[in-house]
Amino acid sequence: MTLNILIPAALGYVVFLFFIASLAERRAEALRAAGRAPRFLRSPLVYTLSLSVYCTAWTFYGAVGYAARSGLEYVTIYLGPTLVFVGWWWLLRKLVRIGKAQRVTSIADLISSRYGKSNAVGVIVTLLAVVATTPYIALQLQSISLSFGAFAADQPLAPSQLALWVAAGLALFTILFGTRNLDANEQHHGVVTAIAFEAVVKLVALIAVGAWVVWGLADGPADIMARISEVERPEWQIQPGRWMGLTFLAGVAVVTLPRMFQVLVVENADQTHLAIASWAFPLYLLAISLFVLPIAAAGLTFLPEGMNPDLFVLSLPHSLGQPGLAMLAFLGGLSAATSMVIIAAIALATMMSNHIVVPLWLASRRRAAGRGAIPSRDASDMRGLVLNARRLSIGVILGLGYVYFAVSGGSRALAAIGLISFAGMAQVLPALVGALYWRGASRIGAAVGTCVGTLAWLYTLFLPSFGPDVILSAQLMAEGPFGLAWLRPHALFGVEGLDPLLHALFWSLLMNAAAFLAGSLVSFPSPVERVQSAQFVNVYELGASDESTVTRGWSHDAAENEAEDLLAMSQRILGADVALAFFAAAARGQGKAGFLPDPTPDFLNRLERELAGSVGAATAHAMIAQIVGGRLVTVDDLMAVASETAQIMEHSAQLEAKSEELARTARQLSEANEMLQRLSVQKDSFLSQISHELRTPMTSIRAFSEILMDDEVTQDETLRYAKIIHDESIRLTRLLDDLLDLSVLENGQVNLDIEDDNLHALIDRALMASNSVQPQRDFIIRRQVSDEDIALRTDIGRLTQVFINILSNARKYCDSDQPELRITVRKRAGQVAVDFIDNGSGIPKQSQVLIFEKFARLTDMHKAGGAGLGLAICREIMLNLGGDIAYVPGQGGAAFRVSFPLVLKPRASRAAR
Amino acid sequence: MKSPRPPLFLERSTYRRRRLMDAARILPVVGFVLILLPVLWTRGSDVGTAGEAVYLFGLWAVLIVAAALLSGPLRSALRRDVQGDAPDAGTETKAPEPRGS
């Protein structure tokens, strides 16, 4: 059999697969159009068979080689997943539930979504997945090129050339298969069906070879058991550390490998299928590994020494004259390799486009929009961008796989290569378990833990896997970097003698988990993260209501015209028909005709999930945020709103204070106004009175002077009339003097005549002077003479005038039958206060404010005999003397307090005014 | 462990179902312990790789049968649980073709 037959056979097989895939897709399309679910395509059987993408060329070829080299150890790779599936109630159930509820598109999306939709975490996981999958893809390339080589050892094609062609062909195949369209749920009916078919082919092929070995070559099971015992070697002894470590590692890998996550969670159509798969998938694993040991034993028995044990499956029938079986085995191996490459490339391309390419593109658009270079919502085709990004990613992934194959030499055992990948993807485990079970797990912890674990894995396993002197020098491997022995990649921190894989697994996971825990414990999660952690960890409790109560929600008041923009964007991502149907259904649900529903929070949430199915949660959130723009309420926005509210409250408090102040001012103004009105009334009455007062003497002066002009006036009468005229003139003069005096005092132009005197003498003089007022009234004067002995230095004349005025007023107005006047003197801190208190009825309260005003008079003018200027003058004098005069209420009569400084400083008194 | 409010009286079927879930949780632990068993008895004894293989594949088959027995009732429990939920898997199938408004 030569390449001339093999290549057409391989191509024909691939074309057949393509046919199956497109048939399945068309069938699904037709059923969907008819309103029915594609029942068979989404059945538990297809689901379980698609899970068999776990069994790659590693299983098909590598397991036999593994068994030939290390005995039973190969079963750990299948026992680990068996335990995980048998224990599906623990982990897988929750994982699938969350994957469905959050519309997760990849393992990177799940982790980024859980940790606050952080794209940074998504990028880290994506990069890790790409690097970790690279050896795995190299493994497939190596196995395919080996299988070609096994048939045609004499062909001129070198393995690396062959591998290059295989890589290019697989890239093309995957692009044609996986990126034909963009499904809202990232589900690929056609591909899954083809994978399920391939699962059958590889199982049938391996069992056929196994059955032929057991019943054809050997004489049944008993004979093969004997042969196994015959070829048993010391290396076949079970190594406890590796046994346990590999079981664990395989159990982890079946969940964390990107392609396994893709078929297990993303392509899952019904959560209950998991119950079937919980026993059916282990059954598949059992079936596919059942004949591995017999084939290995047969290979060791029947084939010459030195054959590559990885190719026993192929070389046994080939060299023992079973070309048909050999062809079947070849196709089985091809199936195993292609199915892995297709699914892994699709899963990784989804991650790369959703977490790296599209965010970068969005960021560049936003920058461009910020510069005004392009409108922020332009109509370029997102679908095209996403699909092209995926095509490019597939090319990159297969290219990396080829580079790894070429650099590492392509001659190592398949299983050893695969385990490097397993250990790499296991670095996701702490972040994943934390995401599902620990609410305190935080973004920082996940990012730091994954990074630390990845670096440890790179250093201790991945980079050394290229062989000495390829990337890490042999000297570094033997002596450590810079001669630091405790940093040797295979003996980190002095842990020597451990199997390199176990060593790497131990250190990378230990450091990863430690960094993850420490990072989570010290960091503080963002609000979105807290919400997402509740959604993940408590996914069962949230149940159906989680659709409406998600707090990451959208504000209610998004304007209606935004629905159009949303529709335009969704069409680009989901495709025109799907988007229109989705919008129309939503509009009908709201009771509206047409295609534009109100962008309610509920609708926006559903749309976001729908879009998240295509482009990932973080990107979908960002895209809707871009359109709904300012209307999107993030927690930050809420904070801003809260602080604005606080500002407004402060403003209103200030306004309140101001309005209170205004009210106070208004009150004061109205008081002032009242007083002004009262004063105006008084002024009017005073003016009328003063004109009356002026007219009275003037009238009598005129009358008497007219009489005097008559000739018949006697000498006596002349004298009498002249006296009257004289008196009246004096009265006028005094009135005018008072007015003049007041105006001088008020303007501060008065010249103060400062002398030394004693207060006692001053009061004596004032009492004497005031006795002339109503001399008929007998006043009892009570004084405390000892207190009055105070030396003064002030304008004695003016002060006396004030005292006289007060005393005269008391004499005039005190209405007591036995009038009595008390004069008390107090001295305090350079000030003297003199109180004049009579025992009359005092001054009514409403008049107390007025008595010191000019023209104020409480009683009839004639009765008072003055012009009502006395107290106004007194107050002006006292102000000029640096003191004051005040009415003191509540003293049992009218009480005036005169206070002034002992020593008047003329300058200061002027300044005080 | 995830029963927020224990009911006052235990209906027999729900009680059974919950114990079934416990069994489903215990199964992988038991499996892991039994898988590690060959590690303990390889030294000294002459079971041989063939004997170990028989043991492991036998254990494997038992685990599968046990999981299959448990999966039936668990599946119906899960289905009840999921149907109480939003119809998440059905959205893309029930989207009708756009009718002109």
Image (cartoon, rainbow, N blue to C red):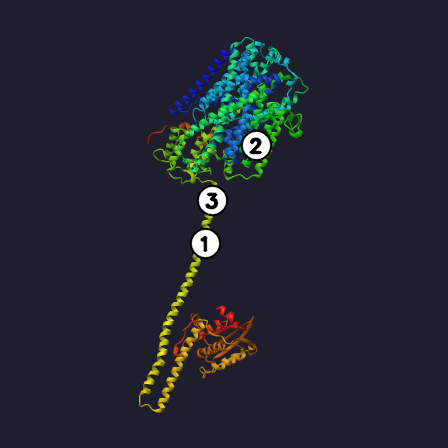
Indicate the quadrant where residue A696 lies: bottom left
User: What residue is shown with label 3?
Assistant: A640
Looking at the rendered image, the disc whose residue lies closer to the viewer, 1 or 2, is 2
Query: Furthest-top residue in view?
Result: A321
Residue at x 52% of width, y 79% of height: A762
Say what secondary structure mark 2 lies in: helix
Residue A237 location (% of width, % of height): 65, 19
Residue at x 55% of width, y 26% of height: A132
CA–CA distance in space, label 3 to label 2: 34 Å
A209 vs A500, nearest the viewer: A500
User: Does A487 sit left or right of A343 as displayed?
Assistant: right
Q: Which mark is residue A669?
A: none
Q: Which mark is residue A654?
A: 1
Query: Furthest-bottom residue in view?
Result: A715
User: What residue is shown with label 2?
Assistant: A451
Q: Quadrant of the C terminus of chain B?
A: top left
**Amino acid at circle 3:** Ala
Mark 1 vs 3, N-terminal side: 3
Residue B57 location (% of width, % of height): 58, 19
Badge 2 sits on which subunit? A
Say what secondary structure mark 1 lies in: helix
**Amino acid at circle 1:** Gln
